[in-house]
Image (cartoon, rainbow, N blue to C red):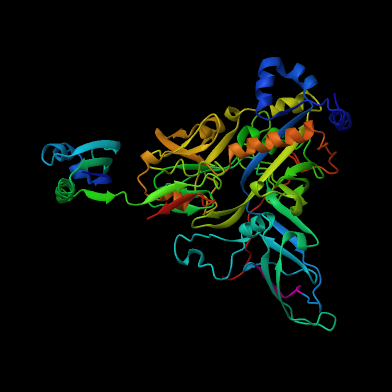
Amino acid sequence: MKTIQEINEKIRSGKAVTLTAEEIVQAVKKDGIKKTARRVDVVTTATFGPMCSSGIYFNIGHATPRIKLGGGKATLNDVPCYAGFAAIDLQLGANALPDSDPRNSIYPGKFAYGGGHVIADLVAGKKLPLKAEGYGTDCYPRTSLHALIGLQDMNEAVLFNFRNCYQNYNVAVNSSPKVIYTYMGILMPEFGNAAFCSAGQLSPLLNDPLYSTIGIGTKIFLGGAQGYVAWWGTQHNPGVARTEKGVPKVPAGTLALIGNLKEMESRWLVGTSMTGYGATLSVGVGIPIPILNEDILAQTAIEDREISAPIVDYAHAYPETKNEVLGYVNYAQLKSGTIEWNGKKIPTGSLSSIRKAREIAHELKNWVEQKKFVLSEPVGTIPSADSGYRFHPLKQGNAKE
Amino acid sequence: MKRMKVVLHFPKESVDKPLVYKLAKDFGLFFNILKAEVKPEEEGLLLVELEGSEEQCQEALKYIESQRVRVQPLSKDISMDKKKCVDCTVCVSLCPTQALEKDQTTGEVNFIKEKCIACGICVKACPYGAMRITF
């Protein structure tokens, strides 16, 4: 019915109609699928939450004399970087911790500062101490380096997250008699609370459940800058059980995202500490969906009550990798603050910020309306439900522990 | 005159005793119940504001403690740094007194200080360091 080029022409002439994934629900209720599909060109989706497989790679520039960090060691603000690439390319993951952090030896650990906080500090414009050691070569004779370095001092600084935007997620509960500290937050004993982590009807991959418009090369909002879908994410698992509309009932697809860290903003990249679990980074992502036909529009009109998430026991089933689901609840129930399970009312809390996701969806909508953002044509597809692609557990082989 | 906020933790066996009534009748205190969670056969929790002379307050608390009720003075203070809060609602489901509430229209998390018993769970739970405790 429409092509991405036609939509881009409308964006450039200021005539494109853009709605957020929440607004489209109301529009379809009022005018129906047919009329709305003709009228609306773009639907903006978004999510904001802790995304642990986030990280940066950066190039620090050559020191005089030269030092080779590849195969050596490096820390940024005491947080270890990965130094397994060329002389002055480093990588830093959101979960990295200073050697001096006591971890969970003082239980539950606070994890007050880690890789995610370093990334947030850099984006906030802070200069941080870099300490590095190399082993010295004929062409890179130097063996140690101390420098104070900020984002603008780096040649390239790129946010490269190899798993973001989980398509649906578990609802975590605790069946045990003691408090547990998890990546889903603090879980109180005997089903005292339930934690979920998805923007539901606003979430990117729940609005394009079979990856028909989102693909490799899709231009997106990443941390306040324009970034791209680089690949599908790690643990991508499209072949799970789905509803008639193709919406996964359990965690399924994921995306790998990339963008220029130098252009990002503090409010969309926030250092995060999960008591008893670790440090990470909360990331704001927005993805536009081009309304190419009625089917695509119908998928974006999905509502929270139509999306179910599995309740999983993080005291037993999760750590023991048992595929046990205690039941299903929908996102309308989860967002209301209470779910009912087994005759018990359980208060719910979200790790994902719906308020922030809503803001991102509006920001991306503004970009399109102000002609600052045109859509890109994907250059490759993401393995879908019928691809046979799956996420499998580790085969340990005969390795001795 | 003295005003103080205390949290009274009742053991199961004391839940059915009219202890708070005695605070008024025998010790002449004014009291205002700010939060109550008292169920038969379960440990109870009462957040009360007491008003009376220093002596009356001390005597009353001594009596309450003699009845195996644990008294927790509210000397700690919790505050929320709105600039750090991302409105994720992690704290909302953990707060035992509903002092943290989500506004269903805006999605914002609000801190209602009057309901807070300073248990500190939100400080531990907040991934963004937005909840602070001061002594």
Q: Position of residue A382 (x, y in %)?
A: 77, 43
Identify the image quadrant of residue A42. top right
Q: Position of residue B99 (x, y in %)?
A: 41, 39
Vertical position of residue A173 compared to residue A144: above or below: above
Vertical position of residue B118 compared to residue A369: above or below: below
Horizontal placement of B125 versus A143: left or right? left
Decide whether residue A312 is among the magenta residues: no
Q: In which quadrant will I find the N terminus of chain A?
A: top right
Q: Position of residue A242 (x, y in %)?
A: 65, 34
Q: In which quadrant will I find the C terminus of chain A?
A: bottom right
Picture mark count: 0
Q: Residue at x 53, y 67 (%)?
A: A101
Q: Report if residue A364 is visible in the image.
A: yes
Q: Nearer the viewer, residue B129 or B89?
A: B129
Horizontal placement of B70 versus B87: left or right? left
Vertical position of residue A340 compared to residue A188: above or below: above
Vertical position of residue A245 compared to residue A30: above or below: below
Residue with the most extreme left position: B26
Q: Residue at x 57, y 28 (%)?
A: A305
Q: Nearer the viewer, residue A117 or A166?
A: A117
Where are the magenta residues, as a range? Answer: A69-76
Identify the image quadrant of residue A386. top right
Q: Residue at x 59, y 37 (%)?
A: A354
Q: Residue at x 66, y 52 (%)?
A: A392
Decide whether residue A70 is among the magenta residues: yes
Q: Report if residue B18 is visible in the image.
A: no
Q: Position of residue A335 (x, y in %)?
A: 53, 34
